[in-house]
Amino acid sequence: MIIPNIKLSPALRLRIGLVSFIAGWILLIYLLASTWPDHDSVPIELRMQSSKDLAIQTAVLLESRDNIKLREILQAAANRDNQINSLAIQTSNDKLALEMGGHGHDQKPDNVHKSTLDFMRAGIAENKKPWGELQVSFKPAATPTVVDWLRQPITLSCFLLSLGGMILFTFNLRRVFNEIDPSSTIPDRVSVAFDAFSEGVMMVDRNGRIVLANSALRNWIEEKNDALFGKDAKDLPWLKTALHPPTNHYPWDNCMETRESSRGWQIDFERREGGRLKAVVNCTPIMDLSTKVRGCLITFNDVTELDRINIELRSTMGELVKSREEVEQQNAALRLLATRDPLTSCLNRRAFFEDAETIFEQSRSSGRPLSCIMSDVDHFKLFNDKFGHAIGDKVLIAVSRALFSGLRAGDLLCRYGGEEFCILLPDTSTDLAFEIADRLRLEIEAKAGASIRDSTLALKVRSSFGLATLSDHATDLAALIDQADQALYEAKEGGRNCVKIWTTQTVTKTSDTPTVQSFKTQGRTESPMEEASLALREFHPKEKV
């Protein structure tokens, strides 16, 4: 007899194998179920049999009217079985003929005509007629625990059957997947075309199983005897580590769900031959003619060399930025050296005039007020002559610090000459400029001397101020500064440590030349001799001058 060679498709063989396994398992469970004992009925049967035996003995002794012997037998039965709580003989009219162990206090079941696991009834007949019954109260049966449930044969059998089924199904499915080659669904010409690509290409089906991987990708990560075909792409360790997908949601899953391409996923993984490879992952859904998603095409663009060049470029750019910052810092330092007085940090004359000229022209063209203050340290030569130039420098630093503290952000402060300072106040009227000048005078008098850190001296530093405001008489910045300087001269002549404002006064009726014969004054004033004497007295408090 010749057996025909029937070829079955892989899918049909898979279905036949699974159905055979399930049918055999059901048959095995049925056979085992018929041999399982009912563990709940065993205690009931034992207690029922014990109660029937006692009932037979009770009936015999009741016919002989031997109540003493009956009590002894019941008592012996109770002593022999430690599960018995109490016994009683009840007549058909519900009267207790005999009671032992406090039977009346035991709880009886709701159904008074049936036996339970804890309360047994055995009928007693006399002359073939119901006479009564023997009642036996047992101790309550223990409540079954989880451990008791696990020890049940049916539980153990189900566990063993499930474990065995998983093992057998695992071996069966592994054999099925080994026999079914997903790559066979891809035509050879398509595989050859993809192998020609220098970038890695991988194709997965709707469930994420790999059906194609070109030679470039295989050369990167495929080990011997570890082919990619048929594996779930999510189970590739190198890809899982490189992507770090949130909640295991991979780019090709999102691509197939949204039916839109996904681009720009950057990954970094170890090559099979050593060395790190950086690639950009792009995904495109594969759809049939009915626009149903059948899988996804995944490409891996090698950008290792490009990334190396970018790193070098970023390093070069960083060095350029650092170099530019250093140049800017050096330029700032140079600008500071070029525009600031090295001792007092005030503007030098060149920088002052560059900014002041612009402010002067803007104020004159717009008609906004502009004031100029000239200040000079009183008796500064005495500081240098008596205590040396080091103390004189400290006096100038203390005075400039006091002047800086009372000025606004837009005001200009310049060290105009040795101990002279020039201040330009934009948008400042004569009265406001006068208040500022007098406040600066008081600040110098109160704090400049005390701020000089030298315990051997008790210096009193004072300054005189001259103020001029932009008017028709000042045609340029130099004229305005000269007016303030004239006012400063009058402050010096008028006793020092005061503020004077430049004004105009006609000398003769035929001349309108402005003079400085009329000034507005603020602060203490002394004659020049009195001021010099006071300064020397302050230097040497115990010395009479």
Image (tube, rainbow, N blue to C red):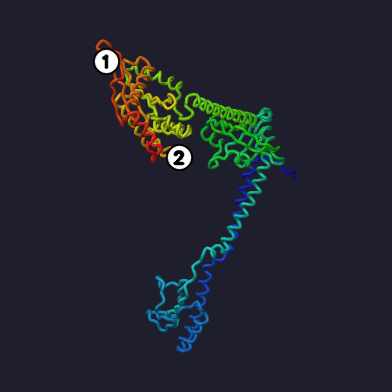
Name the residue at 45% across, 34% down. Answer: 386
Q: Residue 42, how many percent across, how many down?
A: 53, 70
When asked about the image quadrant of residue 365, the answer is top left
If you read the primary sequence from the N terminus, does the residue marked by circle 2 or circle 1 appear first? 2
Quickly name the residue at label 2: 454
SS type, badge 1: loop
| 487 versus 26 height, above or below | above
Answer with left or right where residue 453 lies relative to residue 531: right
Amino acid at pointer 1: Thr
Q: How many marks?
A: 2
Q: Residue 402, how many percent across, how many down?
A: 39, 33
Q: Nearer the viewer, residue 188 or 43?
A: 188
Quickly name the residue at label 1: 506
Indicate the quadrant containing the C terminus: top left, top right, bottom left or bottom right.
Answer: top left
Name the residue at 64% across, 36% down. Answer: 211
SS type, badge 2: loop
Indicate the quadrant containing the N terminus: top left, top right, bottom left or bottom right.
Answer: top right
The residue carrying pointer 1 sits among few (fewer than 14), some (14 to 19) or many (20 or more) residues within 10 Å by Cα, namely few
What label sits on residue 309 in the rendered view? none
